[in-house]
Image (spheres, grey):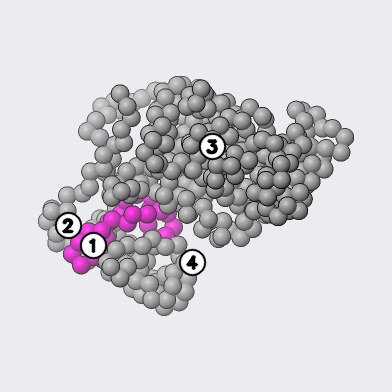
């Protein structure tokens, strides 16, 4: 039986409660980057706003944003800093429809009812069996590839530590299972250093060769000399790896800088807002988000990714995965409000090898 997306069941807006609800209230922005008092902040869930008697869904709802009514009576979702003078921002703090604002969390619920009040090992830990989760993941990823989905990956630098995981992920890029990558300077430098010098931070396997500690900085230096990561790869000096596969397959990579970066690749965003804007271009259209062993990038990406998206006029879920060796790390998204996430506690090198084998071999 092939995988099928769960069908979205919208609210019944013919009910008297919705029919009699008022239109949502709006106030205009009077200072750039400043929302009106009593602004309504959005969530990751589908939200509807009543405008001139019609309930309108916010197509790209995400956390820490506000709803702006457009001239054609639609809804735009904007970050606070992107508000312009004259923007008509929805105000009101209720979400039950009484102020023309309705947050809906039951659109993808099935008819199944869980009768057990106690379930042993229902959480995720190192002792959890994941074979069923892998099978489900493969089916979802195949569906996304075959149906023009957008799979966005969030990568920690540890994926670039060995040749096996780099080659496995590169093969996923080559076979169309990667539409965008988010990461930081360290990942990019590790991947390029491995491709150019066969070391990571100067280490080859578990020992450092003489003067190999220069390789990390030398990698960045060569990339800056070339002018960009693309030009470095086109020079022929980069023999393999994830970034090489991305350049060859025209897969966008967003590298966001950190205060810890002592020297950065030329393509790394050193402005946090510019990095967020670059990432949101992809999360707004994502149908799947897979985060591998990077706590801060995972939280940031999860918070800006809604639990649903509207594709070809149809509301569908966004599948979010968080994978790390530590339970603490994979559960951070739950703590920060991103509830629609499946977690696997495992080494990400093993994870990516399994995924490549399950989808390609």
- N-term mark: 2 or 4: 2
Q: How far apart are marks 1 and 3 (CA)?
A: 42 Å
Q: How far apart are marks 3 and 2 (CA)?
A: 46 Å
Whether 76 is drawn above or below 233: the answer is: below
Q: Position of residue 50 (x, y in %)?
A: 23, 62
Q: Nearer the viewer, mark 3 or mark 2?
A: 3
- N-term mark: 3 or 2: 2
Kindly identify the residue that appears in the image at 52 percent across and 27 percent down: 356
- Residue 272 lies in what quarter of the image? bottom right
Disc 3: CA contacts within 10 A as few (<14), some (14-19) or many (>=20)? many
Q: Distance between the residues labelled 3 and 4?
A: 34 Å
Kindly identify the residue that appears in the image at 28 percent across and 40 percent down: 108
Q: In this view, does 4 lie to the left or right of 220?
A: left
Q: Position of residue 317 (x, y in %)?
A: 34, 42
Whether 323 is drawn above or below 10: the answer is: above
Q: Of helix, strand and loop, which one carries label 1?
A: strand
Magenta-colored span: 42-65
Q: In this view, does 177 lie to the left or right of 226?
A: left
- Residue 143 lies in what quarter of the image? top left
- Labels 3 and 4 touching (C-beta < 8 A): no
Task: Tell me the residue that label 2 is attached to.
Answer: 18
In the picture, the disc for residue 81 is: 4
Q: Of helix, strand and loop, which one carries label 2?
A: helix
In the picture, the disc for residue 50 is: 1
Residue 346 in sight in this render: no
Q: Position of residue 28 (x, y in %)?
A: 36, 75
In the picture, the disc for residue 173 is: 3
Q: Residue furthest front?
A: 235
Q: How far apart are marks 2 and 4 (CA)?
A: 32 Å
- Labels 1 and 2 touching (C-beta < 8 A): yes
């Amino acid at each position: 039986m092939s995988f099928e997306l769960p069908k979205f069941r919208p609210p019944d807006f013919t009910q008297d409660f919705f029919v009699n609800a008022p239109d949502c209230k709006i106030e205009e922005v009077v200072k750039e980057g400043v929302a009106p008092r009593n602004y309504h902040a959005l969530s990751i869930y589908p939200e509807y706003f009543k405008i001139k008697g019609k309930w309108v869904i916010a197509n790209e709802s995400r956390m820490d944003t506000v709803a702006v009514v457009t001239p054609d009576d639609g809804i735009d979702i904007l970050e606070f800093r992107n508000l312009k003078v004259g923007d008509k921002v929805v105000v009101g703090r209720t979400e039950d429809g009484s102020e023309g604002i309705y947050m809906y969390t039951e659109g993808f619920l099935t008819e199944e009812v869980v009768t057990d009040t106690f379930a042993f090992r229902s959480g995720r830990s190192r002792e959890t069996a994941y074979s069923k989760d892998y099978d489900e993941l493969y089916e979802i990823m195949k569906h996304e590839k075959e149906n023009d989905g957008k799979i966005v990956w969030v990568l920690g630098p540890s994926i670039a530590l060995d040749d096996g995981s780099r080659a496995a992920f590169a093969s996923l890029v080559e076979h169309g299972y990667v539409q965008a990558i988010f990461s930081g300077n360290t990942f990019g430098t590790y991947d390029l250093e491995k491709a150019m010098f066969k070391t990571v931070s100067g280490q080859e396997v578990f020992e450092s060769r003489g003067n190999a500690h220069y390789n990390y900085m030398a990698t960045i230096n060569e990339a800056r000399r070339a002018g960009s990561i693309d030009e470095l790869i086109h020079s022929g000096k980069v023999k393999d790896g994830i970034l090489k596969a991305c350049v060859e397959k025209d897969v966008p990579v967003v590298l966001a800088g950190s205060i810890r970066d002592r020297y950065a690749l030329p393509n790394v965003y050193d402005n946090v807002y510019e990095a967020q804007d670059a990432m949101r271009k992809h999360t707004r259209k994502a149908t799947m988000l897979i985060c591998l062993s990077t706590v801060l990038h995972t939280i940031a990406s999860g918070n800006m990714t809604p639990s649903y998206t509207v594709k070809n006029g149809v509301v569908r879920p966004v599948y979010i995965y968080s994978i790390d060796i530590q339970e603490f790390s994979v559960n951070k998204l739950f703590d920060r409000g991103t509830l629609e996430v499946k977690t696997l506690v495992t080494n990400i090198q093993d994870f990516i090898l399994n995924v490549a084998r399950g989808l390609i071999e």
